[in-house]
Amino acid sequence: MAGHLFEVDNLNIEFRRSDDKVYAVNGVSFSIGEGGTLGIVGESGSGKSVTMMSCIGLIRSNGTVKAGTAKFEGHDLLKMNRKQLEHIRGLEIGVIFQDPMTSLNPLMRIGDQIMEGMIEHHYATPRDAFDRTINLLGEMGIPEPKTRFRNYPHEFSGGMRQRIMIAMALACEPKLLIADEPTTALDVTVQMQILALLKEQQEKKNMSIAMITHDFGVATNFCDKIVVLYAGQVMEVAETKEFIRRPAHPYTIGLKNSIIEVGQRDRALKPIPGMAPTLTSPPTSCSFADRCPLVTDRCRNELPVLRQVDGNHMVACHRAEEVLNHAV
Ligand SMILES: Nc1ncnc2c1ncn2[C@@H]1O[C@H](COP(=O)(O)OP(=O)(O)O)[C@@H](O)[C@H]1O
Ligand code: SF4
Ligand SMILES: [Mg+2]
């Protein structure tokens, strides 16, 4: 079996606010193998972006990594200085940020923006970087790359801008790509095209991908393994086929039930009633208790720890076995 390219262990992150603290990430662990695709799934505010971005040194100034390791090829990124991280970011780890409009420079031609990273990281000479940019634009399905090279971000549609962002992230052939909600702002057809493009690149280069998404359907279609986050904790982690066949956490089942299938857009969406909590003290009971149809007194008094229920299938729920055996 291929080794782990990226391995997060017991990550804890806190944010200071004016008069309290937010416990945004609480003991999160997961790994991504070489060529593996991991879906990081959960509702908005569950800690997906903070988890991944803090591993590569992108954390807001009021945030602190309190504990944990984030090893990339065996080296802990959390121990690296700014310069070391800047070197790895873009070269070894590519990032597609959540909002293309804030990540692209509106005053710079898109071709120059794609070339910039390759030159800065000494990945290519300016001449080779130019040729590679033209090739990349073509591979990303952008028509007339030589002409489009000279255009500015506002001259492209949302879908095309997303393709440019992908080209930038892939420019130096990273081993790991972090894609933070890469298709959220796009309509369903464009969303599927972008995911297909990413998959094609992933397979061609045997690249690993961490796909951050609130859409359980995107994760099950795209990824071979999924980790479900809720209130900054891992609720369930397993291979995708296991998630489809036998989800074992009540929250995962809720996420699964809220998927809208393509072509069934008018089907009633069944969101899980209630909202994800913002924790202002470390969790000591099940964070999902207030929304869980299976809640018992034990859930309100005892923190469910992540434990193995089968093979590589891990769940943090006191009643996981009953869920698995359809006993509830
Ligand atoms: N700068 C910040 N200050 C205080 N709290 C923050 C900050 N950034 C994030 N958080 C907290 O961390 C939680 C997780 O945020 P985030 O990882 O962005 O969620 P998502 O799963 O939507 O990507 C938020 O709900 C919020 O409570
Ligand atoms: S531990 Fe209890 S409240 Fe939490 S998800 Fe499981 S059954 Fe529901
Ligand atoms: Mg996010």
Image (tube, rainbow, N blue to C red):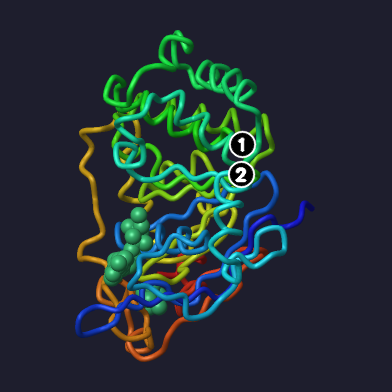
Q: Which mark is residue 172?
A: 1
**How many C-alpha atoms fall within 10 Å of the one at disc 2: few (<14), some, or many (≥20)?**
many
Residue 307 appears left or right of 229: right
Rendered-image quadrant of the C terminus: bottom left
Instruction: For the residues labelled 2 and 1, say whether their Cβ atoms are less than 8 Å apart.
Output: yes
Q: Is residue 63 above or below residue 211?
A: below
The spot of residue 224 in percent (x, y) is 59, 46
Is residue 110 visible in this depiction of the protein? yes
**Which quadrant of the picture is home to ligand 1?**
bottom left
SS class of the residue under badge 1? loop
Residue 235, quarter of the rendered image: bottom left
* Position in image of residue 284 (x %, y %): 38, 88
Residue 309 image point, x, y percent: 59, 70
Q: Which residue is at a point 51% across and 27% down the rendered structure image?
A: 197
Q: Residue at x 60, y 22 (%)?
A: 132
- At 43% across and 41% down in the image, what residue appears? 218
Residue 103 picture location, percent across and down: 36, 41
Q: Is residue 4 above or below residue 100?
A: below
Q: Which mark is residue 91?
A: 2
Name the one closer to the observer, 104 or 319: 104
Say which of 31 and 109 sits in front: 109
Q: Report the side of 13 relative to 175 (left or right).
A: left
Q: What amino acid is at disc 1? A: Cys
Outermost residue on the bottom side: it is 301
Query: Rounded to the nearest whole Å, what is the CA distance between mark 2 and mark 1?
Result: 5 Å
Residue 43 appears in the picture as rendered? no
Q: Is residue 24 left or right of residue 306?
A: left
Q: Nearer the viewer, residue 294 or 90?
A: 90
Tell me which residue sits at (30%, 28%) in the image. Answer: 158
* Mark 1 neighbour class, 10 Å CA radius: few under 14, some 14 to 19, many 20 or more: many
